[in-house]
Amino acid sequence: MMGRIAKKFCSTANRATVGLYSICGLLTAAILLFDLSVPLGVAGGVPYIVVVLISLKSSKNGFTILVAISCSILTVVGFFASTEGGEMWKVLLNRFLALFAIWVTAVLALIQRSKERELVEEKLRALQTGRELEVQEERVKLLKATMRTVHDIVGNFLNNMQLFRLEAEEKNTLQPESLELMDSIIHDTSARLKKLGDLDTIREKKMPCGSTGIDYEQSTSDGLNHQKA
């Protein structure tokens, strides 16, 4: 499907290019015939400016330069092939002005096109930089949320261990129930950290201190459901 679309696009682009070349060629020939049919005193080369402007429809700068060169040559040809008429200094001045107008138009148009392309590229770079900054901010935000969640899990674990330490200091031993509870807390803490490390999706939650953390229980559930689906 994509191949057909690309082929159709290329075919349309080629037809447009051929059509542009044909228009420029026909218009150039018409202007040359007009130039040859009028006396030298008429500035017959000036209309070639229109061909130069039309050539800007092409994305290739080389085509515009080629058109300007061709129109310049035909302007000189018109000087030698047109019927005589008018004072020579006026004829020469008219031809010079025609050549000058052709090249000023071509050069200024190409400069303008170059600046427009630079502006577009600059906007694209700005958009890319903005997107990279957004991604970086999201990564920092996720890292901070992860560290807060880890701190919460480990903090709860250490608080429980502190209670067991107080019991051991008071009784010089730990009761079997306490040892069983300690094993359960260690296992639960390890499982929570493993869930946090195996997340497939991320959901945030509010921590007791008001900051943002990761709801690893809900996030893990979403990830498992996604894998099952």
Image (tube, rainbow, N blue to C red):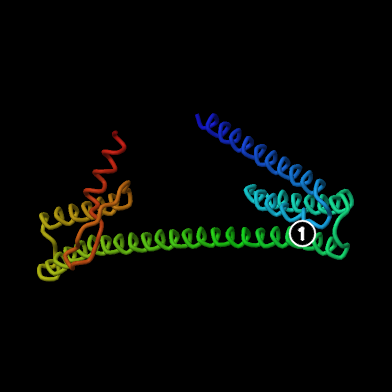
How far across and how far down the image is residue 131, in percent? Answer: 43, 59
Q: Residue at x 62, y 61 (%)?
A: 112
How far across and how far down the image is residue 74, in percent? Answer: 82, 50
**As rendered, which of 191 and 43 lies closer to the eye?**
43
Quadrant in the picture for the C terminus: top left
Q: Quadrant of residue 106?
A: bottom right
Q: 41 left or right of 104?
A: right
Q: Residue at x 88, y 62 (%)?
A: 88
Q: Measured along the vertical axis of the image, is residue 67 above or below residue 209?
A: above
Q: Disc 1 residue type?
A: Ala
Circle 1 sits on which residue? 98
**Element at badge 1?**
helix
Q: Residue at x 65, y 38 (%)?
A: 19
**As rendered, which of 119 and 27 lies closer to the eye?**
27
Q: 56 left or right of 228?
A: right
How far across and how far down the image is residue 198, in percent? Answer: 32, 48
Q: Residue at x 77, y 53 (%)?
A: 44
**Crowding at label 1, few (<14), some or many (≥20) Cα neighbours within 10 Å?**
many
**As rendered, which of 60 and 155 lies closer to the eye?**
60
